[in-house]
Amino acid sequence: MAVLRSFEGTARQTPTEIAHRVGLSVSTAHRIVHALHATGMLGQDPATERYFLGPTTAILGRLALERMGATLLQPELTALRDGTGEAVSLGVRTGDEVAVLLHLPSAHPLRYVQPPGDRNPVHACAMGKALLAFGGEPLAGGEPYDRYTPATLTTRAALDADLARVRDRGHAVNDEERLAGVRAVAAPVRDGGGRVFAAVALQGPAVRFGDDRLPALAEAVVAAAGRLTDLHRHLS
């Protein structure tokens, strides 16, 4: 799994590069890579002998998205993007991170982009705080939490206070806590059993996510999250 996940940060690698990235011996990396290549989990460029994620990985990823209902939610995400003009992401929690499943970029020249597969710290992004606030497991890591900007919440007390506000208003706000100049609003998406399984977010530059516009963006994302929940319940 570590070998496969090493491709999240780079498109193509040699077994030696994988060994250094993952912390394996070169001989062990070669054996694992050859096994993954034999099953189609990795492909290989014959000209460079570098490996990349293969067709089996793509098929499994697509099946996972379909069976989670993520691809069937895309029309609603597209409507949210087109209605607000801002980037939309759908993410799920994996440990103390949020993994981006789907991302629809804004058409604005100045925009925030995070492609599928990107991971963000759960305490420093709007989707993560939405997932934490509505029934999520507490952070596994201890304090202080990693700081990314002067606005990052790095203590349990500060994070808990913010999560209480998230629950009161029904949406989370990332106020330049992960990247300076980027703000976001997010709301939870529930499955057929009422469990929060994902979060949807609007993200963009702070110059377009000012305090005057933030309430309207929050209203739009909460309404979209409700429709996504209803759709997922119907699909379930």
Image (spheres, rainbow, N blue to C red):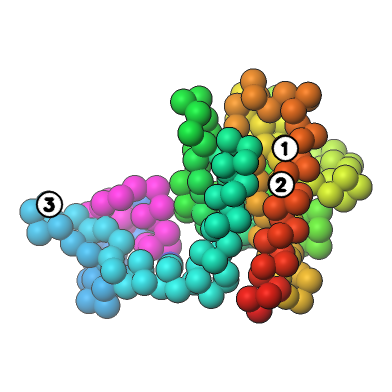
Q: Nearer the viewer, residue 3 or 67?
A: 67
**Residue at image mark 1:** 217
Quarter containing the C terminus = bottom right
Q: Mark 3 belongs to which amino acid?
A: Thr
Q: Nearer the viewer, residue 124 or 226?
A: 226
The stretch in magenta equals: 2-20
Q: Mark 2 belongs to which amino acid?
A: Val
* Residue at (38% x, 63% y) in the render: 4
- Secondary structure under tag 2 reads helix
Q: Which of the 4 quarters of the picture holds residue 81?
A: top right
Q: Position of residue 194 (x, y in %)?
A: 78, 71
Residue 76 in sight from this viewpoint:
yes
Q: Nearer the viewer, residue 185 or 179?
A: 185
* Residue at (36% x, 72% y) in the render: 59
**Residue at image mark 2:** 221
Mark pair 3, 2: CA separation: 45 Å
* Residue at (50% x, 25% y) in the render: 110
Q: Mark 1 belongs to which amino acid?
A: Leu
- Secondary structure under tag 1 reads helix
Q: Looking at the magenta stretch, what is its main secondary structure?
A: helix
Mark pair 1, 2: CA separation: 6 Å
- Secondary structure under tag 3 reads loop
Quarter containing the N terminus = bottom left
Q: Earlier in the sequence, mark 3 or mark 1?
A: 3
Q: Position of residue 174 (x, y in %)?
A: 71, 36
In the image: residue 4, left or right of residue 125: left
Is residue 17 a member of the stretch shown in magenta? yes
**Residue at image mark 3:** 48
